[in-house]
């Protein structure tokens, strides 16, 4: 019954968001056709979709998207592993916990794009530099949420698990991770968003990496040649991918875990 209610609420949310997006699209088209702004700088939505369809048919934007997702997957995967090891070490040792908190206080506010010049000097201008920027941008929200989540698990739950004979990996699997899961999911959401931002920003700063690039390079190139509809098309693809990942991945997991378990008031 509870799962059915959650699914109904999710469908209503999707419908409301869909109506809002349709309204924005209609408003965009009307403003563009009224020509209050130069057509070159503010094209109609219909022309944007026509250009986007052309780019999809010739395969360029699909290839750029796959390349961006490859870079994001590599950087975000490294960040998840690094954050897991760091947060676990901080949980075991109070000294390491103090070090981690000091490190986060110093480096967390630093934008990933700010370290790009140093990374280019160290690693060059290939894909490895973009992966490093993505790793740096996404690791801090992961560590913050993992560190907070693991420490938020009540001691009574830990004792109950030990009384049931759980220890080591079993204690982490059945007690720590479920208790910290809302924080873990939040960290992954923020890290995913930062990974996209870092990937696009890095490619727009120094262009294609190793002769090819992702969506950031696509947008930068189209802007350079003043192909504004294609610029908007690249931005729409980024937005659509973000929405798909949010609804089909993060929200799907949240509905079947956090909300179902009653770990949120929504």
Image: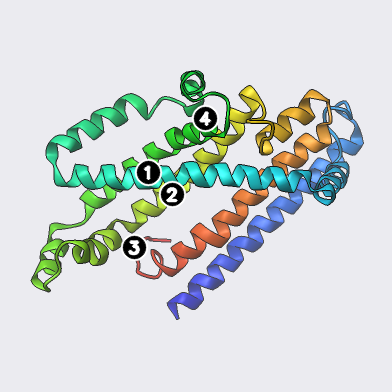
Which residue position is annotated with label 1? 142
Can residue 162 be seen? yes
| Residue sitting at x 67%, y 35% | 213
Circle 3: element type:
loop
Which residue position is annotated with label 2? 188
Q: Sequence order check: which comes first, mark 2 or mark 1?
A: 1
Q: Nearer the viewer, mark 4 or mark 1?
A: 4
Nearer-the-camera pick, 120 or 27: 120
Q: Sequence order check: which comes first, mark 2 or mark 4?
A: 4
Q: Position of residue 174 (x, y in %)?
A: 25, 67
Which residue position is annotated with label 4? 129
Q: Position of residue 112 (x, y in %)?
A: 47, 28
Circle 4: element type:
helix
Circle 4 residues within 10 Å: few <14, some 14–19, many ≥20: many
> In which image quadrant can residue 244 be found?
bottom right
| Residue sitting at x 39%, y 27% | 109
Circle 1: element type:
helix
């Amino acid at each position: 019954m509870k799962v059915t209610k959650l699914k109904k609420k999710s469908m209503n949310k999707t419908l409301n968001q869909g109506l809002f997006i349709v309204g924005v699209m209609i408003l965009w088209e009307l403003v563009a056709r009224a020509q209050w702004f130069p057509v070159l700088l503010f094209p109609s939505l219909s022309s944007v979709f026509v250009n986007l369809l052309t780019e999809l048919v010739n395969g360029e934007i699909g290839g750029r998207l796959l390349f961006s997702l490859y870079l994001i997957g590599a950087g975000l995967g490294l960040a998840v592993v690094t954050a897991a090891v760091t947060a676990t070490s901080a949980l075991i040792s109070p000294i390491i916990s103090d070090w981690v908190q000091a490190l986060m206080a110093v480096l967390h506010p630093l934008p990933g794009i700010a370290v790009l010049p140093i990374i280019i000097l160290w690693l060059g201008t290939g894909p490895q530099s973009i992966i490093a920027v993505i790793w740096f941008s996404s690791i801090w929200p992961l560590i913050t949420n993992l560190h907070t989540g693991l420490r938020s698990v009540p001691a009574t739950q830990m004792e109950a698990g030990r009384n049931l004979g759980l220890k080591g990996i079993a204690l982490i699997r059945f007690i720590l991770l479920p208790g910290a899961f809302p924080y873990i999911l939040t960290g992954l959401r923020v890290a995913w968003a930062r990974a996209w931002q870092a990937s696009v920003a890095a490619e727009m700063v120094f262009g294609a990496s190793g002769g090819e690039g992702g969506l950031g390079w696509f947008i930068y190139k189209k802007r350079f040649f003043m192909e504004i509809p294609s610029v908007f098309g690249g931005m729409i693809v980024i937005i659509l991918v973000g929405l798909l990942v949010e609804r089909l991945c993060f929200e799907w997991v949240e509905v079947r875990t956090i909300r179902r378990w009653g770990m949120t008031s929504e």
